[in-house]
Amino acid sequence: MDLLEYQGKKLFARYGIPIPKGALWPEVPECAGPFVLKAQVATGKRGKRGGIRFADDRGAAGQTVQEMESLSFEGETAAAVYVEQCLDIDREIYLALAIDRDRRCPVLLASAEGGIDIEEAPADSLLRLPIDSFLGLRGFHIAAVARWLGVEGQTGEQLAEVVKALYSLMLSEDAELVEINPLVVSADGNVVAADAKVSLDDNAAFRRLPVEGASESSASRPSSFEQAVAEAGAVGIEIDPDGDIIAVVSGAGLMMATLDILCEAKLHVRAVVDLGGSVLAGGEVLGKVFQAVVAAGPRATFLNAYMHTALCDELARMMIEAQDIAPLEGRVLVRLKGRNSDVGRSLLSDQGFDVFEDLGPAIETLTQARELV
């Protein structure tokens, strides 16, 4: 679950990380202007898309909020506008903790080049410190970060407390990512978290305190496509709302592999669907999945099934029934392999499906359809 900024900052405050005074519009923080207004969206680079603006007072803030509420960020409108006190900024630092799945441990990240252009910062400007999960955060980690950032004295002491608090938050809240960009060093040497990006593990929700507003956040809800697929008894994952292709696959492992191959072929993937246990639940159930796919409007649908124990001809009959319920539009390609796959491919071919036995030729056919790239 990806929290919105104001929700992340509520968590930060709970763990003692300094944050600016702020409130969700129409409330304003109890401080004199000027204010910074921030669109609450789950997408990145909002600052470069007009999602962060400034206002001298409440009156100017009201007019600016109306303009921001009409903006679209990768198809998403702002769930709210957060009004925050402006900070007297001397330096901007990047600081984060993330799960490194290759090392299988948390990694502490720090850069002296924080702010909206962090993605363009040189790779060697980012410090990466793996943290042993058994030993935890140690003093030498904090000292290394302070040296890398060139902070000392009062600022160094405050930085140390922020790093400790971030690590405590990650462990206690089962976070996959806690990021401050930027961590502001003010003119008087104090550090303040000017932004908050927090991603929590959904599977651990039962053992942590609720985050205020998270249940109402668009960032915590599945998309309309994902909801429709879930209601059909399958699992849908939206990759890019502007994509061209939806892949419907017969298992989670094959779904991930298919997505990797499609992306490697530089095909623009809209979403992927794992049929899971619904793969042989009947044509009516599969028809509901097809309805969700049709509603998403892909220019091509790729059905990829590799059946180890179930029969391919049974799946083929269900696909034909589902196609009668909700005809897939655009180009439809089917890769079918496994038990009785010859019979299944013959049935689908007779119904006009573009059918393949092996994955390679199917991907090549999609790649050659230049209008989809």
Image (cartoon, grey):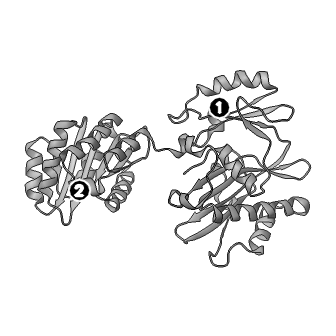
Could you tell me the amino acid type at mark 2?
Answer: Ala
Closer-to-camera residue (310/352): 310
Q: Is residue 113 visible to us here?
A: no
Name the residue that disc number 1 marks.
Answer: 50
Q: Position of residue 277 (x, y in %)?
A: 28, 57
Quadrant in which the C terminus appears: top left
Q: Residue at image x 59%, y 39%?
A: 41
Q: Where is residue 3 in the image (x, y as percent from the top left)?
A: 60, 48
Residue 12 shown left or right of residue 41 in the figure: right
Q: Position of residue 198 (x, y in %)?
A: 63, 53
Could you tell me the amino acid type at mark 1?
Answer: Gly
Q: Is mark 2 on a helix, strand or loop?
A: strand
Q: Is residue 161 above or below residue 229?
A: below
Q: Is residue 246 visible to us here?
A: yes
- Cα–Cα span, label 2 and label 1: 44 Å
Q: Residues within 10 Å of mark 1 (few under 14, many from 20)?
A: some
- In this rendering, the label closer to the viewer, 2 or 1: 2
Q: How many labels does the image show?
A: 2
The numbered dot on residue 301 is none
Q: Residue at image x 85%, y 62%?
A: 156
Q: Which of marks 2 and 1 is nearer the N terminus?
A: 1
Is disc 2 in contact with disc 1, using a CB cutoff of under 8 Å? no
Q: Where is residue 351 in the image (x, y as percent from the top left)?
A: 10, 41
Q: What element carries label 1?
A: loop
